[in-house]
């Protein structure tokens, strides 16, 4: 129970829950809080699920996933990332979130330090708590494109450091690290052999600047990189709940053991659909291209809209579908009895005043910002920003 008391509700899911409650009360809430593509799963993937049902894939699957799926993931990793893995290094889980939970529980002992560049995805910090670890946050700002420097990382590493966890493209900032930037970080970790690197690449396919780069490509640390990915974002398969990890065999074996006691293998039908997804070359997939093009256009559209909001400072994110805006210009302002002290205050003010749901940067380790998701249509983005401008104008 002590562990449970330490955990917080996911702030993104909490904001979505409150938005639904307000909607049920009759308010027209525009939800910019949830990271979910507003596209349907491609038909060829849905067809694979139907075929799986017809072929009676309705029995318990192996704990780490069907072997042909794990082989297909290995093929994807060599095809798209030039990374060589074998099926016994792959564990398929019920979403990338479970993959991450397995990793934290397998590697983090009480008192171990977990280094997180901030802003970081909301569940990282809770998984650190669950595993009994100590969070070491490395702050970044909009002026540095929310990127952590090798010097910051070097200074943060101690004999107790166990994990460095980051995402690229990043949730919540949309930051994408270049090959050179990743190599500079890899050289740091090469000097500290007790540190494992968790590279969350769930937004790999939603990248606006070209080829995806992974820190796992650098041989000096490749045996200590744990790659996490899945199909929820790039293939619009959020509800299918399939993620996977690729790692050294002893780590995969440990995660297999943990998963076997918690959920066992993930949904058999979802796995067969995922098999079809990962076999698809993204370079020739028109469904993926259409979705990424739409997100790219929406990013540019939202950035233009936000230029019209006084005091809202943004950078230009290169991936995912988020803008992480610095809103410190509104701190200390009031509307009646409502005082804005940080991003959390501002996000709830906008929810109850403008009926626009955002997520406070507090949830991501940066109370100076709020996160906008542009995984909705342009007309909705326009109405949301118009409402926000009206509400912010009332703050004095």
Image (cartoon, rainbow, N blue to C red):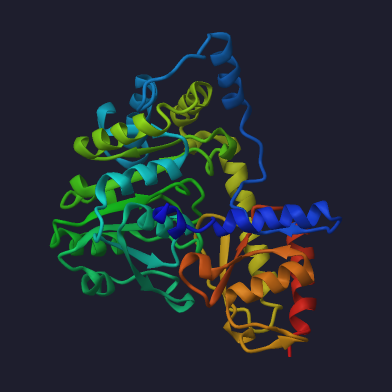
The residue at 52%/70% (across/down) is 362
Horizontal and vertical percent for residue 33? 63, 58
> Does 75 sit left or right of 186 as displayed?
right
Above or below 395: residue 319: above
The residue at 59%/52% (across/down) is 35
Above or below 360: residue 66: above
Q: Quadrant of the C terminus?
A: bottom right
The residue at 65%/70% (across/down) is 347
Residue 9 visible in the current orientation: yes
- Judged from this view, the residue extending furthest toward the front is 1
The residue at 50%/57% (across/down) is 319
Horizontal and vertical percent for residue 12? 58, 57
- Judged from this view, the residue extending furthest toward the right is 26
> Does 153 sit left or right of 352 as displayed?
left
Q: Is residue 306 or residue 274 the one in the foreground? A: 274
Q: Is residue 128 or residue 223 the one in the foreground? A: 128
> Does 293 sit left or right of 258 as displayed?
right
Q: Is residue 321 or residue 132 the one in the foreground? A: 132
Residue 236 visible in the current orientation: no
Q: Is residue 277 or residue 270 the one in the foreground? A: 270
Q: How many marks?
A: 0
Above or below 87: residue 160: below
Horizontal and vertical percent for residue 238? 57, 40
Horizontal and vertical percent for residue 76? 37, 33
């Amino acid at each position: 129970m002590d562990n449970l008391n330490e955990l917080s509700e996911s702030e993104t899911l909490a904001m979505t829950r409150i938005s639904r409650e307000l909607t049920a009360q009759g308010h027209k809430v525009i939800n910019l809080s949830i990271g979910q593509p507003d596209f349907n799963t491609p038909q060829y993937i849905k067809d694979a699920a139907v075929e799986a049902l017809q072929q009676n894939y309705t029995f318990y699957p192996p704990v780490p996933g069907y072997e042909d799926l794990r082989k297909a993931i290995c093929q994807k990793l060599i095809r798209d990332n030039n990374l060589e893995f074998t099926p016994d290094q792959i564990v398929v889980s019920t979403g990338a979130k479970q993959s991450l939970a397995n990793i934290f529980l397998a590697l983090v002992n009480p008192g171990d330090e977990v280094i997180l560049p901030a802003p970081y995805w909301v569940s990282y910090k809770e998984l650190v708590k669950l595993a009994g670890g100590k969070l070491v946050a490395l702050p970044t700002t909009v002026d540095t494109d929310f990127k952590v420097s090798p010097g910051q990382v070097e200074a943060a590493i101690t004999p107790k450091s166990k994990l460095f966890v980051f995402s690229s493209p990043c949730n919540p900032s949309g930051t994408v690290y270049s090959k050179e930037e990743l190599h500079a970080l890899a050289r740091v970790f090469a000097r500290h052999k007790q540190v494992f690197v968790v590279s969350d690449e769930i937004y790999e396919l939603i990248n606006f600047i070209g080829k995806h780069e992974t820190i796992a490509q650098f041989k000096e640390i490749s045996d200590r990189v744990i790659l996490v990915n899945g199909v929820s974002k790039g293939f619009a398969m959020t509800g299918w709940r399939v993620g996977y990890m690729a790692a050294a065999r002893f780590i995969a074996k440990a995660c297999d053991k943990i998963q076997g006691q918690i959920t066992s293998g993930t949904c058999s039908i979802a796995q067969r659909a995922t098999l079809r997804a990962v076999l698809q070359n993204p370079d020739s997939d028109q469904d993926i291209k259409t979705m990424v093009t739409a997100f790219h256009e929406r990013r540019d559209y939202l950035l233009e809209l936000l230029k019209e909001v006084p005091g809202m400072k943004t950078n230009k994110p290169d991936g995912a579908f988020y803008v992480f805006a610095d809103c410190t210009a509104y701190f200390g302002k009031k509307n009646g009895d409502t005082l804005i002290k940080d991003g959390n205050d501002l996000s709830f003010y906008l929810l109850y005043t403008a009926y626009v749901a955002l997520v406070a940067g507090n949830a991501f380790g940066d109370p100076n910002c709020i996160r906008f998701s542009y995984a909705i249509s342009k007309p909705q983005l326009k109405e949301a920003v118009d409402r926000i401008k009206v509400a912010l104008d009332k703050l004095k």
